[in-house]
Amino acid sequence: MEDKAQIQEAIKVQGEVVRKLKSEKASKEQIDEEVAKLLELKARLGGGDDGKHQFVLKTPKETLTGKYGEDSKLIYDLKDQGGELLSLRYDLTVPFARYLAMNKITNIKRYHIAKVYRRDNPAMTRGRYREFYQCDFDIAGQYDAMIPDAECLKIVHEILSELELGDFRIKVNDRRILDGMFAVCGVPDDKFRTICSTVDKLDKLPWQEVRKEMVDEKGLSEEAADQIGEYVSLHGGMDLAERLLQDPRMSQSKQACAGLSDIKLLFSYLQLFQVTDKVVFDLSLARGLDYYTGVIYEAVLTQAGVAPVALASNDAQNGSEESVSVGSVAGGGRYDGLVGMFDPKNRKVPCVGVSIGIERIFSIMEQRAEAAAEKVRTTEVQVLVASAQKNLLEERLRLVTELWNAGIKAEVMYKKNPKLLSQLQLCEEMGIPLVAILGEQELKDGVVKLRVVVSREEVDVPRSDLITEIKRRTSDV
């Protein structure tokens, strides 16, 4: 077997050759010839004497393939000039699993905020973009069942409660329950994933359209589709899990029973975390991504008086535009097999996590603020240092330095002689609560005129007391 280090060094040297030819704008034939040599070296690195493929973790090549099921059509596929298949990051979960495998990490709790990309039809009013930020929270490691899963749901509940986005529900299900349900309803094994992707559309389409896709497009029997329809209409809590454990059909599936038992355990922990008021066990929740192996969940915003599963009903889908504008803002689940896909020895690391859609949340917050005619602050600045006359730039800079040194968030306009009205308008536009105004008379008297932007109240404050007064007035800002 060739020495791996020697091959890697040869790859590095050949890569430099290719880059140099490209920078010199050499002929296509010459570049292609050297690229072919580079690919040949990489192929030699990927295999051994036994003929087996060796998984080499490097710049991603086809990393995203086979992880997302039917959602794979939303991946932005690329191809570099060396012929490697590449893609823009679809989510933060697959790269996280790859990171664990590369670094042989078996235990970690982390959060991550970064951009991801979807080749989708944008809907700006719903916060749906092709390039957007996600915030992920994940727990990796071997732990007792449902404890980290319950913590993820607690975090989602805490975030949505703190943001005051309105009423919400966290729908919970389990992939094992879905697979068991499909099996006892007569879905062929090879159709499990594709039927799961269809069920996942119940938050956007009424049942009749979902049933039609199952039967007409995916070849499922009408009887099997109708049996699935009976189950996906069910929602509840621990009581529903107990009832399904006694169901004549579902009780025949060991897989479904294992999932139902874990749902019961999950709800017992959620009761201790005091979040069951917003969590509902919903058999219509599928989440189409292929890498989920156990518990799955999705947080949806609802309107006042809307039932937890209204988004799966005909009325909600055929109703007003407002009922369509609210929807999923977070989702996640357990993905115990994903890390093993990137490990040469298939070493598995159990993982569970949740992803928060930041743009979706921002879009909703902006719409609510606009509807309520609220002024949204666009800065954390507490006070603007302003001048009432010309030629006071040095005095403004001297005062803003004092405020900065005292830990106060202060600003000045970057003009030598700005008009007072312009400075006051800037405060109103940016939501700056206070203005510290300097004028010739104030400088003579040793005071600063402090103006409250909202009420337009003005008070002269001795220069020596200004920092204390600003801190007092901005303590809750």
Image (cartoon, helix red, strand yellow):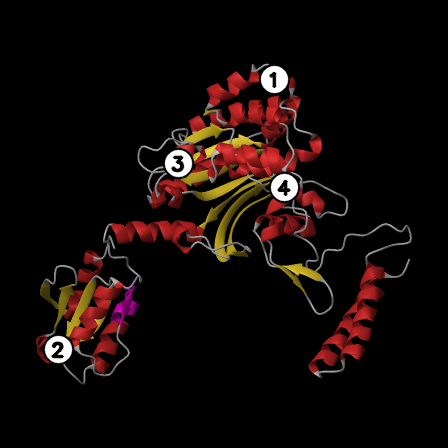
Give the mark toward the camera: 2 or 3. 3
Residue 333 point in image, percent of width and height? 55, 38
In the rendered picture of this protein, how many numbered marks are placed on residues? Answer: 4
Comparing 420 with 223, the one in front is: 223
Give the mark toward the camera: 4 or 3. 3
Residue at 54 percent across and 38 percent down: it is: 200
Boundaries of the magenta span = 402-411
Taking 228 as reference, is 310 left or right? left
Residue 62 point in image, percent of width and height? 70, 55
Type of the residue with mark 2: Gly
In terms of secondary structure, where does tag 3 sit? helix
The answer to whether residue 322 is visible is yes
Vertical placement of 277 versus 194: above or below?
above
Circle 3 is placed at which residue position? 316
Circle 1 is placed at which residue position? 249
Circle 2 is placed at which residue position? 439
- Quarter of the figure that contains the N terminus: bottom right
